[in-house]
Each structure stands twice: as structure tokens, then as C-alpha cells.
Amino acid sequence: MTWRDQGDEDRLKGGLGPSLLAQDLTNKPDDYLIATIQNGRKGTAMPPWKPFISETETRWMVHNLLKKPVERTLVR
């Protein structure tokens, strides 16, 4: 079975760790999220990304993770 066969019931629920949905991150300080992305979390599947992305890029990511999703309408 592959991840594609599992259906949607497990999608976006943080199977390997905490969820990264905006509503689950709103109570976390920006600095906590930045440190998590940059340094990873021991004992979890979250690796450190510091060797690959700058702090400025990480701040941009955090800012965008916390945004509410844009409502999209289907144009016909």
C-alpha cells in the first residue's frame, strides 16, 4: 500500500508529527516555529533545515504558514 492508496482520512493530520495547519500553529510564537524549522526537533521526524534555508527564508515560511487559506472559486 502506498500513501496514495490510503485515502484522505490521514491527510494533513500530522502523521509523523504535529500538524502544520495554520489553525494548529496560531498559539505558537514565531520564534518557536523558526527555531523548529531551523534546528529541527530531536526525537521527531523534523530535521534541521538551517544548512539549506536562511533565517529570512524561514521567517517568510512561518509568515505564510500562519496565513488563512485563500478561498478559491472555480472559474468556468
Image (cartoon, grey):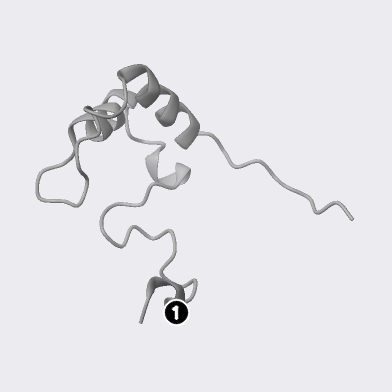
What residue lies at 38% left-to-right and 46% top-to-bottom? Answer: 20
Circle 1: element type:
helix
Tell me how many marks there are. Answer: 1
Residue 54 x/y as whole percent: 31, 20
In the current view of this chain or complex, which residue is farthest to the bottom? 1
Vertically, is 3 above or below 71? Answer: below
Residue visible at 26% across and 59% down? 16
Q: In this view, does 17 lie to the left or right of 75?
A: left
User: Which residue is labeled 1 in the image?
Assistant: 5
Where does the image place residue 63, in percent across and percent down from the top left? 46, 27
Quarter of the rendering occupied by the C terminus: bottom right
- Farthest residue to the top: give it: 56
Front-lying residue, 1 or 36: 1
> What x and y, as percent, mark residue 25?
38, 40
Callout 1, which amino acid? Asp
Q: In this view, does 16 lie above or below 27?
A: below
Badge 1 crowding class, 10 Å Cα cut-off, few under 14, some 14 to 19, many 20 or more, is few
